[in-house]
Image (tube, rainbow, N blue to C red):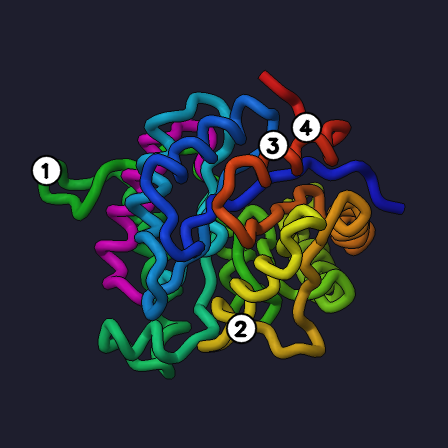
Amino acid sequence: MSTKPSVGVNLPHGVPGVTGETLLTWARDAERLGFSSIGINERIVYANVDAVVTLAAAAAVTEHIRIMGNIFIAAVRPPALFAKEMASLSLLAPGRFTLGVGVGARPQDHAAVQVAWEERGKLVDASLDALAALAEPGDFPHSIGPVPDPDIEILIGGASKGAIRRLLRHGHGFVGGGVNAEFTGYDIATVKAAWAEAGRDGEPRVVAGSWFCSAEREREANEWRTTYLAQGGPPDFVLGPIGAGADGVREVVESYAAAGATEVVLLPCLDDPDELHWLAEVLSDHLDPR
């Protein structure tokens, strides 16, 4: 039996033509409207704005809402740089930074930064180890970065053997997005079973979700998502839906909650702030306005 999840929203950083002003408006409005988090996912070979820079800007214009990397592809930067950037983000949003991290699903992202696709798992491990090392007493000022906020939350994408190992070594829970609730539920069950078998207290935090749009703009949303997924993404048989219209959005939230998500993050297909305000009206019973 599912309980009512909190609801977060990604910033529309991958929508063609999105402006910096629009991204900051989304961040401020999402906080005021009561969403639980604002997130961003990372791609290299796509004309989206940079994930680290955008989250840093969002942290600077908000005070309470959780700032979420949803998700970062750790291996597209050297482990030392990853650790420095994530520790720095955690200090810009103390007590409210969630680092979602995964190996990535698009070989061209790794090729663009001259990282071998076959090495990505090892690099993710090295990156998380480097971040953890910053929390230990270091040789200031010769450390590679600042001491991260002690309340940084780390969520691991996927439920492969490597992902489970990273979860148990570094993580506080699972993060997924864009894959339908049925298949996401399999991953969540795998993660929870591994968590219990390892003797970890309580349950892992679980964040998952899919796209949304108002009913009147469903055609635009589908056109954009087709472009966004043209260079790779979940195959059709596991692709998450676009929750179009009020009923569609509620169905998306309910389906991921039933699969085990305690927070559902909705991914915008359009950058119009009216879409965010519409979403807040539809899901007002899930939000905590300020």
Residue nearest the viewer, comparing 65 with 163: 65
In the rendered image, the quadrant that contains the C terminus is: top right
Mark 3: which amino acid? His
Q: In this image, 142 relative to 47: left or right?
A: left
Q: Quadrant of residue 6?
A: top right
Residue at image point 75% right, 52% down? 252
- Does the magenta run of residues contain 104? no
Q: Nearer the viewer, residue 270 or 192?
A: 270
Residue type, label 1:
Pro
Residue to which mark 2 is pinned: 233
For the residues marked 3 and 4, what is the alpha-carbon distance in whole angstroms? Answer: 12 Å
Between the residue at mark 1 and the residue at mark 2, the CA separation in whole angstroms equals: 42 Å
Residue at image point 77% right, 43% down: 246
Q: Circle 1 is placed at which residue position?
A: 141
Q: Which residues are magenta?
A: 76-97
Which residue in the structure is indicated by mark 4? 287
Could you classify mark 3 by the number of other residues whose Cα lies within 10 Å: few (under 14), some (14-19), or many (20 or more)?
some
Residue 165 vs residue 75: left or right?
Answer: right
Mark 1 or mark 3: which is in front? Answer: 3
Q: How busy is the neighbourhood of tag 2: few (under 14 within 10 Å), some, or many (20 plus)?
A: some
Residue drawn at (80%, 53%) of the image: 255
Q: CA distance from mark 1 to mark 4?
A: 43 Å
Which residue is rendered at x = 70% and y = 43% of the image? 262
Which comes before the other along the chain, label 2 or label 4? 2
Is residue 206 visible in the rendered image? The answer is no
- Circle 3 — which element? helix
